[in-house]
Amino acid sequence: MSTTVIGKSGTWRNWAGNVTARPVREVTPATVEELAAAVRRAAEDDLRVKAVGTGHSFTAAAATDGVLIRPQLLTGIGRIDREAMTVTVAAGTPLKRLNLALAREGLSLTNMGDIMEQTVSGATSTGTHGTGRDSASIAAQIRGLELVTADGSILSCSATENPDVFAAARVGIGALGIVTAITFAVEPLFLLTAREEPMPFERVLAEFDELHAENEHFEFYWFPHTGNTNTKRNNRSAGPEKPVPQLNSWFEDEFLSNGVFQVANWVGQAVPATIPTIAQISSRALSARTYTDIPYKVFTSPRRVRFVEMEFAVPREALVDTLRELKAMVDRSNLRVSFPVEVRTAPADDITLSTASGRESAYIAVHMFKGTPYQAYFTAAERIFAAHEGRPHWGKVHTRDTDYFAKVYPRFGEFTALRDRLDPERRFQNDYLRRVLGA
């Protein structure tokens, strides 16, 4: 027999520690029916209600002063359909668990982001993505989903069932209902060969179109205060499997990328003047390497150094100009930036509020070490991104509002009209949604 756990709540904090919330109560439903009942009860008590995943968003998208739904009992693989090549998974399932379970079954998602700690519903609802010339975000791989709407009813949607809801709810920012299950397209497990190598900043920009066209997945990291980048190309491979040797993996991915990097950030935080020198050393610390492995072992990596992040999607053709402006801004300022800037791409998709909706996109992500003042850097970067009609990641720091989104998303009105229909009383409203979608 299932039981809903209801508790008086304390303070909820996100992963980066920059968002807190004090809900009236927390509910941990064990079934979809219990979740629906919790939404109905919130309505009776005239409380707002939000579901929260692992807190990997840097915005207050999941924060509430009403009822906080924790989905950790709504987990697991529901069904694998090998004929349709789909997998149905409960909304609270972490991506890590999904990736491991699929690999055991000889299956994989086509593309994924660079961390896998988030729940499937949290990751897709905010538009989490990796990098890809032809393959898009995690949400673009959804073939169907189920959500509990504001009146407590359970709605299924796909390209053929409630298609208007499906078009929007794949990246719904928690505004249309609480997602309870997702059906993803999957494919037979494949191998990727990753080639990582340092490259001068100017060369990457000069050859960017070529690097993007020649590789299925291309990304790079630019180290502020330097002219250096680290590039990564992932392409499908016939094999054989040749993973990074365990000792090398520990040294490069744990010791250098997490351990030494953490210490470097502590030093930079204590003495900001050392940051440009640290950046020069960091940007040369990782040497070139090539390895071949299954997708999630190539796409994802551990992120143990905590940070705050802003990321905007600009039209792909605007990437080079935008990055040059960002570098010029950092070079002429007295900012000290210890985290690399991450650059990725995505093809256009058909999801109403996806950052790649209707246009081929390039993503520029700026980060600051947790606890370091980030406002000056992020404000200056955001000004540059907005000048190129950039669209902020829904789960990362930004200050854009409804008027701005109505300009950069041609289908913005379509989303807000659907929200009016599904949640007329704004049961799923919070301060963040009020700012980005309007009251």
Image: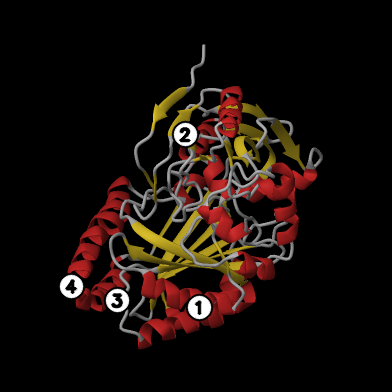
In the image, residue 417 lies at what x, y percent?
74, 53
Label 1 residue SS: helix
Q: For marks 1 and 3, give the one nearer the viewer.
A: 1
Amino acid under disc 4 = Val
* Disc 4 from disc 3: Cα separation: 10 Å
Contact (Cβ within 8 Å) of mark 2 with mark 1:
no
**In the rendered view, does 227 fall on the left or right side of 120?**
left
Amino acid under disc 3 = Arg
**Residue under numbered circle 3:** 336
Label 3 residue SS: loop
Q: Mark number for residue 70?
A: 2
* Disc 3 from disc 2: Cα separation: 38 Å
Q: Mark number for residue 220?
A: none
Which comes before the other along the chain, label 2 or label 1? 2
Label 2 residue SS: loop
**Residue under numbered circle 4:** 271
* Disc 2 from disc 4: Cα separation: 40 Å
Task: Quarter of the image for the C terminus: give it.
Answer: bottom right
Q: For marks 2 and 4, give the one nearer the viewer.
A: 2
